[in-house]
């Protein structure tokens, strides 16, 4: 049975003793009812895994003994999904969760011509990524950027392979038919798609138009499908 798995961004092997955050301490002692001697795993979200055991239980400041450290290499493939903020916030949060489980390394929220909802709580959204990372037993937390304007994203893109998924009728490549790359960015539009001007801007900047299949997808579904197709190539 897998050990309980927690995120602590300040944990390190520099000290053999580590005090868990209040949130983690409460979860260990009050939710899981873990007691002195119980084993657990910690990650800093940067590839480091720590096996530890509780030596002092407290609902606010549980102390653990670091017994073993393992460092996992960063994902070989850099996958950046640049997706517009959605009108329905819960759907955007669902995308964040699934993209993390799939293995996306970066998420860039976009402000586009058709974006209706611009409020973005980075702390809440990052918390969703952390929960998904722990649930899927990963040790690398995706980078979640602050929202930026579409034209800024396109102008500053330096990825080896730059793709845009849009709904306009024109010839497109299916992602699986393109050569695999270890550094990919995919642009995903909001409800109502990218504007014609945004699509032209991306194409002029070297983005390749791609198809995600034969059906029209919701924006958040398109993001998950794109992430899956890119990560698994």
Image (cartoon, grey):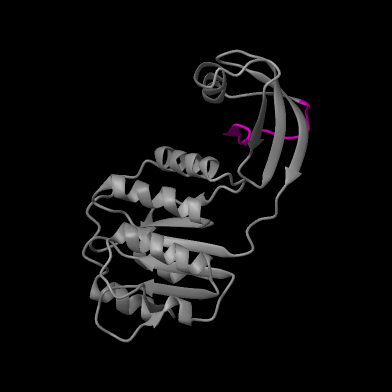
Residue drawn at 23 percent across, 51 percent down: 87
Q: As displayed, is residue 46 above or below residue 216?
A: above
Rendering coords of residue 218 (x, y %): 27, 61
- What residue sits 34% from the left and 76% below the top? 201
Write down the quadrant of residue 171 in the picture: bottom left
Is 183 rendered above or below residue 117?
Answer: below
Of 189 and 229, nearer the camera is 229
Task: Tell me the quadrant of the picture where the C terminus can be found.
Answer: bottom right
> Residue 46 in magenta?
no
Number of labels in the image equals 0
Q: Residue 68: image x %, image y %? A: 78, 35
Q: Is residue 149 visible?
A: no
Residue 168, image x, y percentages: 25, 78
Residue drawn at 64 percent across, 63 percent down: 76
37 with respect to 135 (left or right): right
Q: Predominant secondary structure in magenta?
A: loop
Examine the rendered structure and indicate whether residue 113 appears above or below residue 9.
Answer: below
Q: Is residue 22 toward the left or the right of residue 47 in the image?
A: left
Q: Quadrant of residue 210?
A: bottom left
Q: Position of residue 221 (x, y in %)?
A: 33, 59
Vertical position of residue 8 compared to residue 143: above or below: above
* Bounds of the magenta segment: 1-16
């Amino acid at each position: 049975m897998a050990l309980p798995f927690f995120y602590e961004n300040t944990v390190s092997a520099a000290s053999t003793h580590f005090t868990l955050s209040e949130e983690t301490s409460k979860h260990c002692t009050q939710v899981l009812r873990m007691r002195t001697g119980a084993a657990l795993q910690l990650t800093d979200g940067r590839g480091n895994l720590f096996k530890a055991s509780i030596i002092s239980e407290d609902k606010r400041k549980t102390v653990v003994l670091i017994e073993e450290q393992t460092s996992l290499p960063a994902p070989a493939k850099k996958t950046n999904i640049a997706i517009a903020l959605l009108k329905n916030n819960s759907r955007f949060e669902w995308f964040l969760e699934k993209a993390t489980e799939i293995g996306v390394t970066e998420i860039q929220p976009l402000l586009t011509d058709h974006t209706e909802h611009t409020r973005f709580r980075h702390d809440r959204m990052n918390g969703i990524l952390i929960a998904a990372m722990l649930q899927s037993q990963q040790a690398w937390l995706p980078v979640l950027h602050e929202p930026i304007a579409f034209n800024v994203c396109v102008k500053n893109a330096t990825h080896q392979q730059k793709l845009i998924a849009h709904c306009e009728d024109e010839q497109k490549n299916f992602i699986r038919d393109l050569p695999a790359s270890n550094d990919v960015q995919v642009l995903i539009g909001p409800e109502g798609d990218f504007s014609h001007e945004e699509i032209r801007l991306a194409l002029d900047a070297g983005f390749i138009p791609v198809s995600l299949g034969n059906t029209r997808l919701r924006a958040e579904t398109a993001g998950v499908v794109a992430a899956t197709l890119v990560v698994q190539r």
